[in-house]
Every structure is written in structure tokens, then in C-alpha cells.
Amino acid sequence: MSRIDFDIAHLLAGTLVLISFLELYQDRLYALLNVYAAHAFVLAASVAWQAFVQDAPHLYVTAAIALVFKAIVIPVTLHRIIVRLGIHREIEKVVGVGTAMLAGMSLVALSMVVMLRVTHGADPLAREDLAFALSVVLLGLLMMVTRRNAVSQVVGFMSLENGLVLAATGAKGMPLVVEISVAFSILIALIVIGIFLFRIRERFDTVDVQALDRYRGERR
Amino acid sequence: MTIDALTGVLVIPAIAAALLAVLPGYRITARINVVATGLTLLCALSLFFRRPEPGIYLLVDDLNATFIVLTTFVGFTTSIFSGSYIGHELEIGRLTPPFVRFYHAMYQVLMFAMNLALIANNIGLIWVAIEMATLTTVLMVGIYRTHEALEAAWKYFILGSVGIALALFGTILVYMAARPVVGEGIDAMVWTILVKHADAFDPALLDVAFVFLLLGYGTKVGLAPLHAWLPDAHAEGPTPISAVLSGLLLNVALYALLRFKMLLAVNTGALAPGPLMVTLGLISLVFAAFMLYCRRDIKRMFAYSSIEHMGIITFAFGMGGPLANFAGLLHMTMHSLTKSAIFFAVGHVAQVKGTQRIADMGGLTETHPMLGWSLVVGVVAIAGLPPLGIFMSEFLVVSSTFARAPLLALVLVFGILVGLAALFLRLNSIAFGEPRGPVGKTNASYVPMFAHLALVLGAGIYLPPALVTWFQNVAGLLG
């Protein structure tokens, strides 16, 4: 592999980590969605570059899914859901920006230490890709635990999943990558539908009142 | 591809799911559901006698044959129970005919996904199948469309998704470890090929992979720090689904974990997966045993009891060795049978009483002797008292642990006793004393419940030598 191929792959994966940090401190849902769209766009570029470098045409399918589905369809849909539900100002963070950023930095350091140490046998491209991918996964998890709002939790999950796709495409010649990215897209589509149903019911009180009377949980 | 028993366990549920999705009418669909699961069970049983050669996607060996037969058997009996349960739900209007159609189709899809996960020879395929099983159960947990059911489904969805995401990362790492040795492409994901070459894999990479797989699939097993979805999903979904979740899906996730444990066992440089599993198992056991005390919802209580028992099983497999593995396998089988029998009883009880609150039930042995006493036998069994099967398997787990790690065995016994006391405390108020709540007649199907309890009792008194040899053989495979 030539030097420039490696550098570009590195640049794209690094950008993905950087955008994960951007997501971490967004405090408006619209802005968060825009940043997520950028995240998915960079992922698409990164996957396409891997497809080109590895000469693996099937990866272009994964790149296309990332571009069309994750960078365009999902953000637009979520945008509309937010408008419908009127929750664009709702941002409930559990911890402040500073703490979240510090936690994020230590997670990135952790994943570098872990992955670079255990993968010294692997080829350099896959190695660094994996370290970046783990950082993106951990930052996605961090975002899921620091937000209380369902939409931003889902955005956290989606960026976590972008990290997984990055790892899967970085592992040269891995089979089933396309199938797995399709399976994940179905999962995400269902989650988005889920939010819609769930929040609509909560907000407009279309829940059957009798059902509430029969509440059988233990918290109240 | 020729039609054999192996494709049968996949094709029958798939066809049944398609049929049930379009057919109207509750009576006929409930019967088709029973017939399809029955046929699947027959196919699974035939795997004991004739089995195809492992391919790159599917594999049958002694280990998963055991799991498949258990899964299809409990799937079959649950479908019989589900017939009368769903009939009652239709009558009182909690479910409408379109939802029943959806429910039956999803039931078959779930059977398909679990069978696929069990016979897959490809670590990617196992992952896809477990994701599919998760999604179908999420849809079924939310089927009542109440606020609580949707919330439970949402919680299960998010936690389950994070779990399977972590498991996928672990799977990718296993592929990365295998690639330099096995070569690129599909071969590096085929389990039988992996296990042959695992000795040459990079141990450090396998270690990290296993940690991710343990956290990922461990979420689906319901191990303690990752269990939060489990009680909600059990309490708010339809009871047949609680029975299948507790009795089967948790086992399927554990099975995936065991396959990876076997990979690591081959590699001498990798960390021993045992201590990790032992720790998580003990935490789950003790935690769940204490949580049993403050339960007010009957299905939630038995959900915590499932966490407790999955803890014991994970602990036993973590200890490893022929005796502990044997005990783990036996305990898993007994727990599946007993817990689904309990959920059958609980389902009918909750329908009679119109509630799941323990405070609103009482004196069941007086008002509904058949249900009440079955529940008593089930709880006695699950608490681990002789002469029932769980006593024997728990005894084996404890005694094999005492021989090797007495301190761990103390914790184990402590957890089991705490759980036992909690279960009897609750059982006393449910089954005996003044009758409370409605005492209407019930249209219950007793056959599945009695069949399970009879099997558990039979196994506790006399375990056929053929079965013992079989389990010993499988325990040897697990290493």
C-alpha cells in the first residue's frame, strides 16, 4: 500500500473521531442532527476509500447505504419528527460539556492504548483504523449515557454503529459486511419508528386511560 | 440443497411464519402454530440419529443438538399454552385479531431466528440471528401497546442494541485475529475452521475480542450489571413470550458465548475466560437473590429468578471441567423446563386474577387447586429443593465448586439460600392463606405445565444412563 493511500484512510478515520467529539457538546437537537449527517458523510467517504484501496467493489454498496440512508434519509426523518413533536429545545444533559469532553478524551486514549498494544501483528492500516473505530464506538456509548432525550440517544447509537462499520470495512476482506450494514440499517429504521410511536403516545396522551389504571409496575 | 432435518428446523418456521401472517381466524392459526412447532421438534429430534456434514454456514454437533432439542421442545409446549392464553386475551379484548395474527407470525420468526443462531457455523451468521431474535422479541414485548409495554420494549431495544453492537465489535476482532492465519474471506468466520487454527491466533487480540463478546452477548443472557432490560421485558409482554425469553432466548445467547469460550480454550496464550464468567455469574446470582425480596409483580419476580439461575449456569460453565460443565448443562435444561412451566402457571393465574400484583393474589391452592399446586411444585423446584431436578444440578454445581474453590462455593450457597428464602416468602402469600381477588373459572391448558414438571421431577429422581452419557460427552466438548 502506498503512503498516500494510508494517509487518506487515516485522515478520514481521524475526522470521524473528531466529529464524534463535535456531537458530544451539541446542545440543540437540530445542530446535533446536522453534525450526525456530517459524521455519516465522512463514514461514507471512508468506506468508499477502503473499497477503492482494497479493490473490493461490494464495499461501495455499504458506502452508498451510509450516504443515502444515514447521511440523508435518517437525519431528514428525525428532523421532521422533532418538528412534529415540538421538542427541538429539549436538551437534558446529565453532565456538563467539560466533563463530557474530558471523559471522551480519556476514552480515546484508552482505546489507543488497548488497540495499538494488542494489534501489533496486524497491518498498520487495519490497526489504526481499529483504534479509531473503537474510539468512535466508545464516544457513541458516552453520548448515549450522557443524554436523557430519546432522539439524542438514538443519534449516539447511530454514531456508535458508524464506528462498527468503520471497523468492519477496515478489516480487510471481511465477509458479510454488506449484509451486516443492511441489518443495522433495518435496526435503526425500527428504532426511529419506535421513537415516533413512543413519543407521540406520551405527548398527546393517546394511551388508553384504562391501560394506565391497570398499571402493574413497581415504581408508583 | 437437499431437504434434510437441518434445513427442516429452519424452513418449517419460515413457511409457518409466512402462512400465519396472512391467515385470518384465531382457532386455525393457533393450531397451525402448534403443528409447525411440533414438526420442528420432530426434525430436531432426528438430528440425534442422522446429521449432515458441517458446511460453511451450518453445523450440527453434540453440543448444539442438545440446545436445539431443548429449544424446539419448549417452543412446542409453549405454543400449546399460548393457544389458550391468547384465546383468553382475545376474549377480554386486550388483543385484537390483527395483533394475534402478528403475534403468531412473530412467534415463528423467533423460533426461526433461535434455531438459526444455534445451528450457525459462522460467527457473523450467529450475530445476525441473535439480532433478529432480539428484534422479534422487542416487537412482541410491546404488543399490548400500553404505556408500560412500550417503555419496556424501548428499554429492551436500546440495551439490546448496545449489546449486539458490542458483540459485533468482538466478532470483527475475532475475524482480525483469524485473518493472518486462515486467510481472507468467509473461511475466517467459519467456527469449525477457526477452532482448528485458534492456537495460532494472536492471543492479545482474542482477549479483547472476548471481553466485547462477553459484554455484548452477556447483555442478552441478562448477566447482572447488564440485566436492566430483563425484568421489564418479562413483566410487560405476553406470558408465552416471558416463558420463551426465560427458557430459551437467554440460553441461545449463552450458547454463542460458549462457542467463543471454546475458541479461547484452544489458544494457550489467551486469557482464561473462566474467571470472567465466574465473576459475572456470581454477581448476577447474589444481586438477583436480594432483588427477589422487594418484588410486588409476580412476573417480575420470576424474571429476577431467571437472572439468578442464568448466573448459576454461567458460573458453572465458567468453572469448566467435566463435572462443572455437566452440572451447568443439566441446570440449564432443568431451569428452562421449570421456568417455562412456572410462567405457564403464572400466565393463567394472572388471567384469573386480572392482575400481576402479588398483593392481589392469595389462597390459590384453595380456589384453583390445579394451578395453585402446580405453582407450588414449580417454585419448590426452582428454589432447588429435593427431589426435583434443579436440586440435583445445583448440588452438582456446589459440590464440584467446593472441591476446587471453597470460598467461591460459600458465595454460591449464600446466594442460593437467600433466593430460596425470598421465593418461599412470596409463595406463602400467593398459594396459601385467605383467598384474595377474583376466583373465576379458568380455561387453562394444563398439559404443557404438567409435562414440564413431570420431566423435572423424573430427572430429579432418576436420570437415565443414556442421558448422563450424552451430557458427559457434551461436557467434554466444552472443555
Image: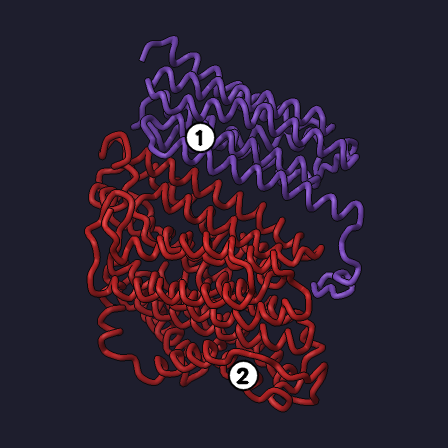
Whole-number angstrom distance, CA of label 1 to CA of label 2 = 54 Å
Q: Position of residue B301 (x, y in %)?
A: 60, 69
Q: In the rendered image, is residue B254 in sight?
A: no
Q: Position of residue B291 (x, y in %)?
A: 60, 66
Number of the label disc, if any, that sits on residue B376: 2
Number of the label disc, if any, that sits on residue B361: none
* Residue at the spot 42% in from the left edge and 52% down from the top edge: B113
Answer with left or right where residue A195 lies relative to residue B321. right
- Note whether A158 is above or below B316 in the view shown: above
Q: Quadrant of residue B253?
A: bottom left
Q: Secondary structure at mark 2?
A: helix
Give the amino acid at mark 2.
Answer: Val
* Residue at the spot 67% in from the left edge and 75% down from the top edge: B358
**Disc 1 chain ID:** A
Answer with left or right where residue B376 lies relative to residue A78. left
Q: Chain drawn purple, letter?
A: A
Q: Position of residue B276 (x, y in %)?
A: 41, 53
* Residue at the spot 30% in from the left edge and 35% down from the top edge: B177
- Other-residue count near label 2 (Cα within 10 Å), few / some / many at <14 / 14–19 / ≥20: many
Q: Position of residue B115 (x, y in %)?
A: 37, 55
Q: Nearer the viewer, residue B313 or B91?
A: B91
Q: In the rendered image, is residue B471 in sight?
A: yes
Give the residue furthest to the bottom. B366
For the C terminus of chain A, give its image quadrant.
bottom right
Q: Nearer the viewer, residue A183 or B338?
A: A183
Residue for badge 1: A113
Answer with left or right where residue B317 lies relative to residue B233. left
Q: Colour of chain B?
A: red
Mark 1–mark 2 contact, CB under 8 Å?
no
For the N terminus of chain A, give its image quadrant.
top left
